[in-house]
Amino acid sequence: MSGPQDWSRRTRAAQALGRIDETTQGLVPPLHVTTTFIRDPAYADWSGSIYGRPDNQTVREAEALIGSLEGAAATLVFGSGMSAAVALFLGLGPGARVVAPRRMYWALRHWLKDEAAHFGLEVAFCDPEDLDALKACVAERPTRLVWLETPSNPLWSVTDIAAAASIAHAAGAALAVDSTCATPIFTRPLALGADVVMHSATKYLNGHSDAIAGALAFARGDGLAARAADIRKLHGLILGPFEAFLLIRGLRTLDLRVRAAAANAFELAQRLANHAAVAEVLYPGLPDHPGHEIARRQMQGGFGGMLSIRVRGGRDGAIAAAARVNLWKRATSLGGVESLIEHRASYEGSQSPCPPDLLRLSAGIEDVEDLWRDLDQALRG
């Protein structure tokens, strides 16, 4: 009889690993909200759970499902993507050196640039899609961790994960990959040599814009995983059981949602590439994208639901176009079932490396013709 280990990732996600509530035979796993657990009189035999901060069965089920999709030996979920990433960095300890991309998720770049030094971390920035530059940066000083984000937000450059893993490991460093936008449906960094995968699970893994969560999936249940678990417990970086329940709910439709969003993004990217009001389309699925061949090799089955456009008319033209949309929603975040549009430079402020004429688009799962008509009229003005 086949079990979850024999199922495809799509089936494992849809079935939430096929678990049935033993008490009620309910198809949906129950929500566990207890904050404490009974111990036996001698404090000898116990369930493995002591207190709700580190111990919650709903959280464990979310971890098991994400870990199965990523092929991980150990998985931890957190109260946000930021707390997941920060827990990993703090686990390196004072004096550790980290190499990270110049262009990446804005809030985490800000933390690495302005906050990491307060915890004794040294951070060097480079362009990791340039493997020679990455190798040189890692070799400058002893490095504990190389951090990648691919495709990178919001310019969608692509880094060769397998090659970056070789560079990191040759220098004695671990490789961590923010795979939020690729998702385990299209990319499995651990199978390409990465040591850790991070997800802002708020985005595609949950997919309904109603829960904040983060996750770390580890290739090995070794020191990095154990230290991140300790930091989560001691710093209170936990995911609540209700949010874990919503995350499991969202993961059941992950494959369908991600593929639908990617199909919409690909179609829109092709059309926008020929639009008179668009100066450039940034999307790894387009053949003229600098990282297209790498993306085609390491993103199996699709190029993701995120793209950006640079609008003719500069900053004013971009903001004016975003103001004219009706179906697309002007909002921060990405990866939900609804399509979002955002002028990133306005959100990120004066220190943003994002071009002022850029609009970031998160394609949802709506009818692509409706999405196109709304974008077209907005760009035409």
Image (cartoon, rainbow, N blue to C red):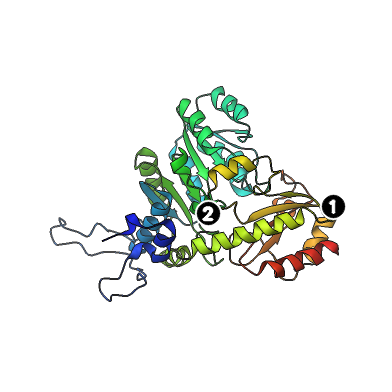
One can see residue 121 in this view: no
**Residue in front for this viewpoint, 176 or 375:** 375
Using residue 87 as the reference point, say whether residue 360 is left or right of it. right
Residue 100, image quadrant: top right
Query: Which element carries disc 2, helix, strand or loop?
Result: loop
Q: Indicate the quadrant containing the C terminus: top left, top right, bottom left or bottom right.
A: bottom right
Query: Which element carries disc 1, helix, strand or loop?
Result: loop
Using residue 341 as the reference point, say whether residue 53 is left or right of it. left
Marks 2 and 1: which is nearer the front? 1
From the image, tell me which residue sits under label 2: 200
Most distant residue in the left direction: 42
Identify the residue at horizontal 34%, vertical 61% (top origin).
Answer: 56
Q: Position of residue 140 (x, y in %)?
A: 57, 23
From the image, tell me which residue sits under label 1: 312
Which amino acid does the dot numbered 1 rest on?
Arg
**Residue in front for this viewpoint, 63 or 49:** 63
**Residue in front for this viewpoint, 247 or 38:** 247
Identify the residue at horizontal 68%, vertical 66% (top origin).
Answer: 368
Q: Position of residue 210 (x, y in %)?
A: 54, 67
Graded by Cα atoms within 10 Å as few (under 14), some (14 to 19) or many (20 or more), the crowding at tag 1 reads some
Q: Indicate the quadrant containing the N terminus: top left, top right, bottom left or bottom right.
A: bottom left
Mark 2 → mark 1, Cα distance in angstroms:
32 Å
Identify the residue at horizontal 80%, vertical 67% (top origin).
Answer: 324
